[in-house]
Image: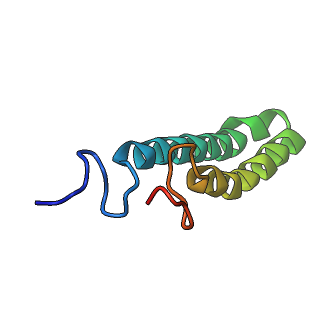
Amino acid sequence: MTDRPPGASGDGVPRRTYGRRRRRYLALMAVCVVLFVCAWGFVRLVSVPLAVGMCVVAALIPPVAAVVANRRGPDDPWWDDPRR
């Protein structure tokens, strides 16, 4: 038997937190891929500067996605949290 509550992972962080983080990360990365595909698929036929701008925005999304996905939520334990 384990002393963990149902739904908790081995490190004490609830699984729903990881799911929320994954969904946010995947949503941002999907936007990134859509921007790249749209920019060079058909936007470049209308406006090359707009396509380049879309690619610049798409290039900035992965670091933002990593920060958003790794941000601590209000219910997440922290390394020095006395609740542990």
In the rendered image, which quarter contains the C terminus? bottom left
Residue appearing at x 72%, y 42% in the figure: 39
Q: Position of residue 21 (x, y in %)?
A: 50, 47
Residue appearing at x 57%, y 43% in the figure: 74
The mark total stands at: 0
Q: Is residue 84 left or right of residue 24?
A: left
Residue 45, image quadrant: top right
For the residue pair 63 and 1, the one nearer the viewer reads as 1
Does 27 appear above or below 84? above
For the residue pair 37 and 46, the one nearer the viewer reads as 37
Name of the residue lying farthest toward the left:
1
For the residue pair 21 and 34, the one nearer the viewer reads as 21
Residue appearing at x 47%, y 55% in the figure: 83
Q: Is residue 50 left or right of residue 41?
A: right
Q: Position of residue 82 (x, y in %)?
A: 52, 60
Q: Position of residue 19 (x, y in %)?
A: 41, 44
Residue appearing at x 23%, y 45% in the figure: 6
Q: Is residue 2 left or right of residue 49?
A: left
Does 15 appear above or below 12? above
Name of the residue lying farthest toward the bottom:
79
Q: Position of residue 60 (x, y in %)?
A: 75, 54
Name of the residue lying farthest toward the right:
49
Name of the residue lying farthest toward the top:
46
In the rendered image, which quarter contains the N terminus? bottom left
Residue 62, image quadrant: bottom right
